[in-house]
Amino acid sequence: MIQAVRLRKHYGRTKAVDDLSFIVKPGRVTGFLGPNGAGKSTTMRMILGLDTPTGGDVTIDGKHYTELKQPLRKIGALLDAKWVHPNRSARSHLKWMAVSNKIPVSRVDEVLEIVGLTEVANKRAGGFSLGMSQRLGIAGALLGDPEVLLFDEPVNGLDPEGILWIRQFMHRLADEGRTVFVSSHLLSEMAQTAQDLIVIGKGRLIAQTTTEQFISDATQDHVRVRSPHAVKLREILAASATVTEDAVDGALVVHGLPAPRIGEIAAENQIVLHELSPQRGSLEEAFMQLTKESVEYHAH
Amino acid sequence: MTLLAVERIKLFSTRSPYWCTALAIAMSVGFAALLAANADQVGVGLTQAGTRLALVVVLVLGALAVTTEYRFSTIRATFLAVPGRTSALVAKTAVVALVAGVIGEVAAFGSWAIAKVIKPNADLAINTGAEWRAVAGVGLTFAIGAILAIAVGILVRQTAGAVAILLVWSMLAENLVGLIPKVGVKIQAWLPFMNADNFLAVNTPSAGEVEATGGGVVFKLSQWGSLAYFAGIAVALLVVALVVAKRRDA
């Protein structure tokens, strides 16, 4: 379990993270969602003891990262795939990490196999594509067989194949019962991977909830109805739902009744329908709506 | 021990240490060969002239060992694996200093040997304490120089900056201080690389002799005292660097 309590990180007058409290539950995939510059990476660096918080506290199972004896066995992290010396081979890179936490060196070949880098194990990491670097980073995170995994924007810049691979991989890790904490600025991406969501904007907590709950709250379903007897239909529907009128084409917009039920009501009253279409708000729209206030840089 | 093994793997899995080692040894041995071939009188002290150049290469090696970690952010990967930053950096310093010491010994005895081969009849027997110090002591100054370079590397973090500071300081600045009228030479007696050179000198003129030859640096410390002073400065700088690294966001 990762627990942040009133975590703050200020750079001069800029508040990168401001009074942020959250809990990442064990055995689940938790998405860490927020627009670019919301403070996701800074928070992750504080979890991992790289940056010192200005105030507040963040612990992993009650301990600070810096108090962990062999941290790679407890928590594996991929913050940036490029944190590798370009002239060092993939195997050497993993080898020094393994030795530092007394992990058997045989584990290096195991994780290279898991991420599919066995064939390029002795090639210099500087020649790797972004996708390969990302795999090497994940191999490093898995090295100590940790119960907690942290990924910062793992799909950023990847091609569709790479994205699919990472997504499936995270599901696999969750199925193995590990705690996965993964950040992203794309809600659609998180909707497919995360069970829980922690949403932040401008360093502050916006929501902590299950993904399902978040999406249903954020996207309201409604039904568009067009009918030559619109006025009569509107009167009938208004008894059990909220009905508004589309300003563009005059269609009725019904909130609170499912499309089949509207069709039945129309049939009972012998009203002809020209259109009956369920609408679903887009996730990204809802997310932008939610974080609009807290986006740091707006395009004008 | 674990951390020493880690830093050994890191150091020897990149190319720059090999290049620096080869360059340092080649420069000092090559310089010794040139001097031996062209000088009329070759003594043990003269064979070591090139090691001063090799020291500069070792300073670069030391600085690179940490600045490349910052450049490629592997320092963060290091601090993730070993959250105790001080022990991680001390281990790195120990490994690099040891390697620097070995480079120094190879360079010193290699330079002496090549001179012996080129001028077999010259008096190159190492048989006084001063001569032993001048040759075998090179490794010590290299090891201490490496500690100093790592400290500068940790503080500056950028390769270009750290290397520039180390080169300008050790090759230029300490000599230029001597140009300041009157106090210049007095200051020089307390500069780190001047003291390293004093430690290695075969013939150290007394204060009276310096006076007679028209000025020069009069060291207040004995030759071993000079070495201890050089080491003290390096360690002090390293302590400052470790404190800064611990407090700074990685």
Image (cartoon, coloured by chain):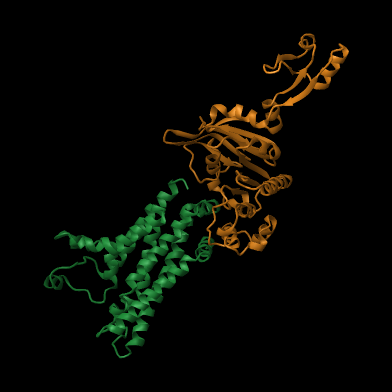
Chain colours: A orange, B green
- Most foreground residue, B145 or A81: A81
In terms of image quadrants, where is residue B162?
bottom left
In the visual, does B95 lie left or right of A239?
A: left
How many callouts does the rendering have?
0
In the visual, does B73 lie left or right of A178?
A: left
Counting from the top left corner in percent of width and height, residue B142 is at 37, 68
Position of B36 relative to B21 (above/below) = below
Position of B239 relative to A56 (above/below) = below
Counting from the top left corner in percent of width and height, residue A87 is at 53, 62
Q: Residue at x 38, y 64 (%)?
A: B59
Counting from the top left corner in percent of width and height, residue B84 is at 50, 52
In terms of image quadrants, where is residue A112?
bottom right
Instruction: For residue A294, say whether it is visible.
Output: yes
Position of B40 relative to A252 (above/below) = below
In the visual, does B243 lie left or right of A196?
A: left
Counting from the top left corner in percent of width and height, residue B169 is at 30, 60
In terms of image quadrants, where is residue B235?
bottom left
- Most foreground residue, B33 or B42: B33
